[in-house]
Image: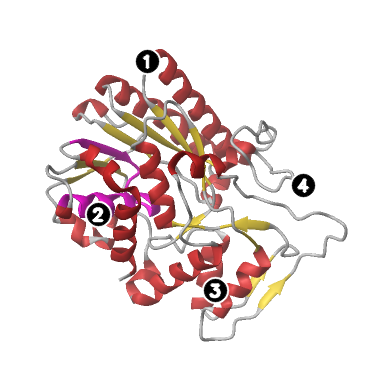
Amino acid sequence: MIIPEDITSIISSVGNKFFALSGQRLFIAGGTGFIGSYLLKTVASLNDNHLEDPCNVIVLSRNPDAFFKKMPDMARRSDLKVIKGDIINFDFNSFNCDYIIHAATEADPLTVKNDPLGSMETITRGTLNVLNLAERNKVKSFLYLSSGAVYGVQPPELEQIPEDFIQGPDLSVPGSGYAEGKRYAEVLCSIYAQQHGVPAKVARLFTCTGPYIDLKATYAVSDFIMRCLGKEPIIINSDGTPVRSYCYSADLTVALWDILLSDARHACFNVGSDDSISISGLACFVASCFDETVPVIINGPASEGKLPSRYLPDITRLKDSFDFNLQYDSLAAVKRTIDWIKESPANINYQSG
């Protein structure tokens, strides 16, 4: 019952703003993955229970069959059309829309590392294609899902990163292609907002977790959960002190709807949790959520006298603009993710569509 509870909470939190979607056409690029799944579930519930006229959704996906295999209830919906295609070369002249959420990217660290050029091309060319679609349709709102990676390495003495923090990734490192691609895509949004009047907003996402998480992705939380499921030791190849935060998918989804349906004109918002936890603390907590005793092994040497690395957003702008409040802190977000996995054996093998 976790997902129905979350969707009810999302609709209650966003409230009457959702009525703007009545009778509208929403296009979501990359809408069958972790984030898109909650967005689609939200619209389905709105159409079934709240909107006078349905909001029809068009989703571009590289693998619709995988999505419908994981979410068969969505395959029967007349208000949802999932189109197979790649954002780089898809013919966007084949449909019209009123709202756009651009979430298409390849964010798995291992994939980005192995193919930085392909990752960057998907971000940059894909964003240009979707912005052209937005301009042609004179959309009412355009939301681009960027990343906290655009800030580069967070100085350890900086508690949280605000939106006006001016820094960037190391351009001499090929792995910075993902972050620099996101930065370039944000500039494209600025240009289209200024020159073509596209009502673009940017959400800079930090680390998230929740139902529909791809457990085969190479993130710390998914790796720790998979190791516990396999009854294997959790291995940390650092001193365990790096500080992170984890935003629960329902909180994330509320923030995204708030931004999309707002009157903000080309505004950027950090979206994530400002509740911190160390990597070693996360590992020990994940292990404690399972019945078996899973050891946590820290391989990295202690960093005496050094501040731990940090990756934490300042979400003051989000809170002040939308009266936004996190329902779940980092530990509660991870615990609810694990509870969802335990609900059904099928959830263990969930992967993005």
> Given contact means CB atoms under 8 Å apart, are the residues at marks 1 and 2 in contact?
no
* Mark 1 vs mark 3, CA separation in Å: 49 Å
The spot of residue 249 in percent (x, y) is: 42, 56
Can residue 353 be seen here? The reply is no
| Residue range of the region highlighted in magenta in the rendering | 24-47
Residue type at mark 2 is Asp
Counting residues from the start of the chain, the first of labels 4 and 1 encountered is: 4
Query: Vertical placement of 204 versus 89: above or below?
Result: below
Query: Vertical placement of 340 versus 45: above or below?
Result: below
Residue type at mark 1 is His
For disc 4, the marked residue is: 157
For disc 2, the marked residue is: 65
Of the two numbered discs 4 and 1 in the rendering, the one whose residue sits closer to the viewer: 4
Identity of the residue drawn at 19% across and 61% down: 73
Counting residues from the start of the chain, the first of labels 1 and 3 encountered is: 1
Left or right of 85 on screen, residue 196? right
> Given contact means CB atoms under 8 Å apart, are the residues at marks 4 and 3 in contact?
no
* Mark 4 vs mark 1, CA separation in Å: 40 Å
Task: Tell me if residue 45 is in the magenta stretch.
Answer: yes
Of the two numbered discs 1 and 2 in the rendering, the one whose residue sits closer to the viewer: 1
Which residue is the extreme one toward the bottom?
292
Left or right of 69 on screen, residue 231? right
Which residue is the extreme one toward the top?
195
The spot of residue 337 in percent (x, y) is: 44, 67
Of the two numbered discs 2 and 3 in the rendering, the one whose residue sits closer to the viewer: 3
The spot of residue 261 in percent (x, y) is: 33, 37
Q: Residues within 10 Å of mark 1 (few under 14, many from 20)?
A: some
- The quadrant the N terminus occupies is bottom left
Identity of the residue drawn at 51% across and 35% down: 120
For disc 3, the marked residue is: 227
Of the two numbered discs 1 and 3 in the rendering, the one whose residue sits closer to the viewer: 1
